[in-house]
Image (spheres, rainbow, N blue to C red):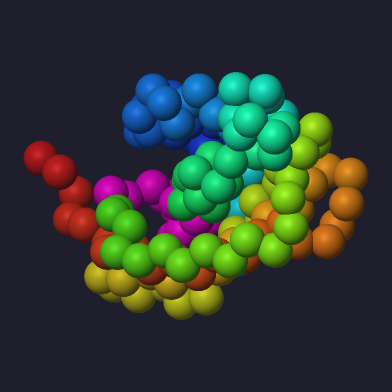
């Protein structure tokens, strides 16, 4: 079963150390997807105090891995095939929430969408469409 405790362990067991430096946490999980929180940090900001696009793209990509795992009932290795990101407005001085939903979960591919908002405003900061190749279990 893919539950919150399993998801929290994934943050340290599966992802690269620099992804762990984004200070992500699992806000919610269900069969349709997952929501991750990225805590605000000045380290994630550009020189103008706005959270950089690279951090937002990494958050969206990571959230979708959790959504696919939750929808499939377990983590399995996967790799990003495509990510399209639309930045709609700046995010500054706030945590960012990534609400990831699985659109289609197949045998070898998964597709999803992610909406990013801040914890103080429900208007989207960015939207992403993602595709993943689902890999065979490593030996």
127 within the magenta span: no
Q: Quadrant of residue 59?
A: top right
Give the quarter of the image for residue 30: bottom right
Residue located at (70% from left, 34% from top): 48
Main secondary structure found in the magenta portion: helix
Observer-nearest residue: 49 or 134?
Answer: 49
> Could you tell me residue 40's position as x and y percent?
71, 29
Front-lying residue, 111 or 58: 58
Magenta stretch: give its range.
Answer: 63-77
Examine the rendering and report whether any part of residue 9 can be seen.
no
Which of the 4 image quadrants contains residue 101?
Answer: bottom right
For residue 5, side relative to residue 94 (left or right): left
Q: Which residue reaches farthest right?
A: 120
Extreme residue toward the left, this view: 139
Q: Residue at x 85, y 57 (%)?
A: 122
One can see residue 21 in this view: yes
**Side of 32 relative to 2 (left or right):** right
Residue 76 counted in the magenta span? yes
Judge whether 88 appears above or below 77 on screen. Answer: below
Which of 112 and 119 lies nearest the eye of the viewer? Answer: 119
In the visual, does 114 lie left or right of 57? right
Residue at (35, 66) in percent of width and height: 82
Q: Position of residue 100 (x, y in %)?
A: 60, 59
Question: Residue 27: where, in percent of width, then height?
Answer: 70, 41
Decide: is 102 above or below 33: below
Q: Residue at x 15, y 43 (%)?
A: 138
What is the quadrant of the C terminus in the image? top left
Residue 106 point in image, percent of width and height: 35, 75
**Above or below, 20 relative to 85:** above
């Amino acid at each position: 079963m893919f539950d919150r405790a399993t998801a929290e362990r994934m943050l340290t067991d599966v992802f690269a150390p620099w992804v762990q430096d984004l200070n992500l946490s699992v806000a919610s999980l269900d069969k349709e997807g997952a929501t991750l929180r990225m805590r605000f940090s000045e380290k994630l900001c550009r020189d103008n105090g706005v959270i950089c696009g690279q951090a937002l793209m990494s958050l969206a990509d990571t959230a979708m891995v959790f959504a696919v795992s939750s929808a499939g009932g377990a983590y399995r290795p996967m790799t990003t095939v495509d990510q399209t990101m639309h930045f709609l407005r700046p995010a500054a001085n706030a945590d960012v929430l990534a609400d990831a939903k699985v659109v289609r979960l197949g045998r070898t591919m998964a597709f999803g969408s992610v909406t990013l908002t801040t914890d103080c405003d429900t208007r989207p900061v960015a939207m992403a469409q993602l595709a993943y190749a689902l890999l065979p279990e490593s030996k």
